[in-house]
Image: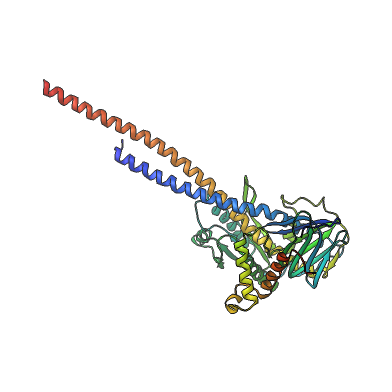
């Protein structure tokens, strides 16, 4: 879904490997350490520790929504700028379709039981479930109504 | 003067060397570009992390955290990040010189030193010089994966928190820019020094652009700092490995380029020498023939 929001703010997702996202978006939902944190324009300055979960950037100007599985990190919001710092991020962004399919297939096999024990060591079950959810959101173009 | 056969042998040896060094240069320059992209990409992250750390530690209420203070232990740990392969100029030698300074300082102040190494070359150099190595980290090639990094950071943090070590430093080659790299030591634990280093880096723009305002903190500042400390230790360790790998590959590109240039110059000289020797051999043979023919006609 391409964003239509007029009240946008700057969102950046920074990792040691590079800047994964730098855009103006209408809504940002972060996986906080104790639950989800929703950020809109003119949010009060906040510094929040992140847990493992799905980060959703929606109503982005000129592009579709972006989803990331984030495992820990920090988010700092001030002056209509949100900077998310994360060490461990999984995303389909910029990934070849084949590679993304392979990752999704692996995640599905972990979540739905096929080769469960074999895969256990390779991928965290919770992380796999999040990847599957991220794929569902991306396929639907946003959250189900 | 050497015979033509010998000259040809030497020339072919120089050609082989030039091929090998040329290939090594190409491989290293590709790896260098990959690491350089990672390094440039990570600068924003380091900058944002440093700003975050600065904001947290300069808050009105001073933070009391076990990782910020010192402990009573007389043992210090240093992690040396060298290379697995040689032929990269003075890369490993410079690191060794720095380790030598640390061992001398430790002896002078009666401290124990636990030396952890990464890279076969530097481990070999240190062992050769009789330096006692606590453990060689060989589970990863150049830069550790996030999981390996977490494990490494947790190990050192635990050693610090349980009082087994009073300090953790990394001896690595810092990559300032493609024109400037230098072997140096970065103190990781206690964290006060790491924050100081991160916030005064040449690559960090600040703190003049930072606006200080009241933040909503979730969870409390201590818990935030706890998570931040883990992230910073991991980031700093990863940064050192990355900068080390960058400097190593750049060092190898330069060395191999010089070696290739020298080999090519040698090939050129040997070709000239070969042509000269061949010419003189032909001249001698012709003189022999002419001399023989004259002798027959007379």
Direction from residue B289 to residue B260 in the image, left or right:
right
Which quarter of the figure has residue B71? bottom right
Tell me if residue A100 comes above or below residue B273 in the rendering: below
Which quarter of the figure has residue A119? bottom right
Q: Position of residue B119 (x, y in %)?
A: 54, 60
Q: Position of residue B13 (x, y in %)?
A: 38, 45
Which residue is more in the foreground, B99 or A66?
A: A66
Please tell me which residue is depicted at 61% across the width and 64% down the height of the picture: B145
Which quadrant would the N terminus of chain B be assigned to in this image? Answer: top left
Tell me if residue A137 comes above or below residue B271 in the rendering: below
Which residue is more in the foreground, B22 or B56?
A: B22
Which quadrant would the C terminus of chain B be assigned to in this image? Answer: top left
Which quarter of the figure has residue B234? bottom right
Q: Position of residue B260 (x, y in %)?
A: 47, 43
Tell me if residue B254 comes above or below residue B193 in the rendering: above
Please tell me which residue is depicted at 59% across the width and 62% down the height of the picture: A98
């Amino acid at each position: 879904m391409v964003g239509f929001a007029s009240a946008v703010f700057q969102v950046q997702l920074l990792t040691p490997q590079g800047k994964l996202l730098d855009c103006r978006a209408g809504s940002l939902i972060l996986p906080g350490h104790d639950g989800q944190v929703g950020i809109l324009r003119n949010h009060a300055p906040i510094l929040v520790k992140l847990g493992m979960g799905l980060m959703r950037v929606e109503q982005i100007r000129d592009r579709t929504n972006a989803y990331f599985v984030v495992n820990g990190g920090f988010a700092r919001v001030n002056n209509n700028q949100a900077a998310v710092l994360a060490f461990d991020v999984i995303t389909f962004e910029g990934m070849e379709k084949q590679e993304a399919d392979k990752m999704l297939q692996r995640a599905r096999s972990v979540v739905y039981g096929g080769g469960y024990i074999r895969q256990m060591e390779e991928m965290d079950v919770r992380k796999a479930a999040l990847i599957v959810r991220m794929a569902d959101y991306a396929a639907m173009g946003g959250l189900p109504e | 003067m050497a015979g033509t056969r010998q000259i040809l042998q030497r020339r072919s040896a120089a050609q082989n060397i030039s091929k090998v060094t040329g290939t090594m240069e190409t491989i290293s320059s590709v790896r260098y570009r990959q690491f350089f992209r990672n390094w440039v990409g990570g600068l924003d992250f380091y900058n944002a992390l440093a700003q975050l750390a600065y904001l947290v530690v300069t808050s009105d209420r001073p933070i009391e955290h076990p990782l910020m203070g010192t402990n009573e232990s007389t043992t210090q740990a240093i992690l040396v990040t060298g290379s697995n392969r040689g032929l990269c100029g003075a890369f490993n030698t410079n690191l060794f010189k720095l380790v030598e300074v640390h061992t001398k300082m430790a002896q002078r102040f009666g401290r124990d030193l636990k030396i952890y190494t990464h890279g076969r070359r530097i481990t070999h150099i240190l062992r050769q010089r009789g330096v006692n190595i606590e453990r060689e980290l060989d589970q990863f090639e150049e830069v550790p994966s996030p999981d390996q990094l977490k494990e490494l950071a947790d190990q050192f943090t635990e050693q610090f928190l349980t009082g087994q070590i009073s300090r953790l430093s990394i001896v690595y080659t810092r990559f300032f820019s493609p024109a400037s790299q230098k072997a140096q030591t970065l103190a990781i634990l206690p964290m006060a020094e790491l924050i100081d280093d991160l916030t005064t880096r040449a690559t960090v723009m600040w703190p003049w652009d930072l606006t200080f305002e009241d933040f909503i903190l979730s969870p409390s500042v201590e818990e935030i700092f706890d998570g931040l400390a883990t992230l910073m230790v991991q980031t700093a360790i990863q940064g050192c490995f990355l900068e080390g790998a960058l400097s190593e590959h750049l060092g190898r590109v330069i060395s191999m380029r010089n070696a290739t240039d020298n080999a090519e110059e040698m090939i050129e000289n040997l070709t000239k020498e070969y042509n000269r020797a061949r010419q003189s051999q032909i001249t001698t043979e012709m003189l022999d023939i002419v001399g023989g023919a004259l002798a027959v006609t007379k």
